[in-house]
Amino acid sequence: MKKENNLTRRSFLKTSAVAGAVGVIGTGSAGLLTSCSGGTQGKGANAPLREPGSYYIPELPDLATDGKELRAGVVGCGGRGSGAAINFLNAANGVTIVALGDVFQDRVDSLADKLKSDKNIDIPAEKRFVGLDAYKQVIDSDIDVLIDCTPPLFRAEHFKYAVEKNKHCFLEKPICVDAAGYRTIVAAAKQAQAKNLRVVTGTQRHHQRSYVESFKQIMNGAIGEITGGTVYWNQSMLWYRERQPQWSDFEFMVRDWVNWKWLSGDHIVEQHVHNIDVFTWFSGLRPVSAVGFGSRQRRVTGDQYDNFSIDFTMENGIHLHSMCRQIDGCANNVSEFIQGTKGSWSSNGGHVIKDLAGKVIWQFDHEAEKTNYKQTDPYTLEHVNLINSIRGNKPIEQASETAISNLAAVMGRESAYTGQEVTWDAMTASPLNYTPADLNIGKMDMSGFTVPVPGSAQK
């Protein structure tokens, strides 16, 4: 892992998002989605942070270009898996789904019923796989693309196996929950690059036109050098499942997975990674250390926290403040703010750039997007990009980039859990592995699933 530990900003910018994609700049939306007042473009007022051609901009048409028929398999057939399956089918002509896998039969059958009713796609019984090894059976079912939407713990190993079997991948975020999973992802991503496989992750803001256009503005120098930022995911409590008498330990936890830290990574990893990812994407920086805190106050099931507040120190010394909460009846905010030497950008309020005096100098034009495009759903557009990359033989490999923001979230979580400073170098080398030693579909030892308590107890 020494090479990863010594990752520089320059090498990250060159390699993280898309292997071999330097110089590929999308122009399909240029000039259509921008609203300027006191414009900064084309006047030499701002030196670019990065030269055009040195960073990746996706093409985001309404529908992928026609081409080779693509057969996909879905692993993880719950709500997000069902959504991703429909997103994939809506993204292009000539694509289909031929195999489904989950640890629960009812989940598989539910998605099969949905595919039949919504898309007239029949999944035969012999292509409906159930169990902890169902992912292998799906991947081995003559598919071109794996759509993996299982609870996050399982995604790293599934990705590894899919790359071994030469499959293109859509991996829902987060793609790992611990240091062991991070290393698995990084190694598999390198193999995917070497095999010319296409990999898109569920960080859909990378395929949301408002974020892409904001990124382009910042790269063009609209706010100057980035000096810091704050990212938020504060919302009401998420769903939970009450245990049913017929459920085993495993079934209870997996059906209630979003509340268990071994399965979800806690909500700073499972959900707030989106916002952390925006900052690491826009800045091109990874954190070198994290110090934070959190607590559990309202959660009904599981063993994770309700809130986190993390101070990240980035590679060049600037700071990112990360805040997330899932508690009913509190102030909500899901957004990102980035400060620069010449101004600031915020996704809150419609993606706006202001100068240092607070004057709006750029704003994303949402009405123009609606006028110029039929498809505005980023959950579908990420599949449009994946399919176009496969059919057009264009490289894209997002797992290694998402691994950066994913491990940042893990660092923040572990700092809050322990009360200690956590460094990038220590975390990349850490033996931290959340997989239970007795993982099985039946009875498990649940005594170890306890709520973390930071620091030392008073004596």
Image: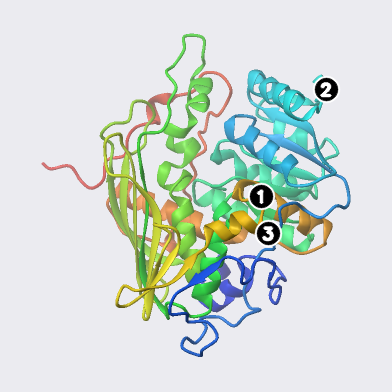
- Which residue is drawn at the image coordinates 66% and 50% (left, top)? 375
Image quadrant where one finds the N terminus: bottom right
The numbered disc on residue 66 is none
From mark 2 to mark 1, how far is it between C-alphas?
A: 31 Å
Q: Say what secondary structure mark 2 lies in.
A: loop
- For mark 3, what is the residue? 60
Q: Nearer the viewer, residue 116 or 301?
A: 116
- The answer to whether marks 3 and 2 mark residues whose Cβ atoms lie closer than 8 Å is no
Q: Amino acid at mark 1?
A: Gln
Q: Could you tell me which residue is drawn at 34 percent across and 32 percent down?
A: 450
- Looking at marks 2 and 1 on the same chain, the residue that comes earlier in the sequence is marked by 2
Amino acid type indicated by mark 2: Pro
Q: Is residue 203 left or right of residue 372?
A: left
**Tag 2 residue:** 124
Reading the chain from its start, which is encountered first: label 3 or label 2? 3
| Pointer 1 local density, CA inside 10 Å: few below 14, some 14–19, many at least 20 | some
Q: Is residue 262 above or below residue 92?
A: above
Q: CA distance from mark 3 to mark 2?
A: 34 Å
The front one of 33 and 292 is 33
Query: Is residue 8 left or right of 124 when viewed as pictured?
Result: left
Q: Amino acid at mark 3?
A: Leu
**Pointers 2 and 1 in contact (CB under 8 A)?**
no
The reply, left or right, for residue 181 in relation to residue 380 is left
Q: Callout 1: helix, strand or loop?
A: loop
Q: Is residue 5 visible?
A: no
Q: Position of residue 415 (x, y in %)?
A: 33, 53
**Residue hosting label 1:** 375
Q: Nearer the viewer, mark 2 or mark 1?
A: 1
SS class, disc 3? loop
Which numbered disc, 1 or 3, marks the residue closer to the eye?
Answer: 1
- The image quarter containing residue 53 is bottom right
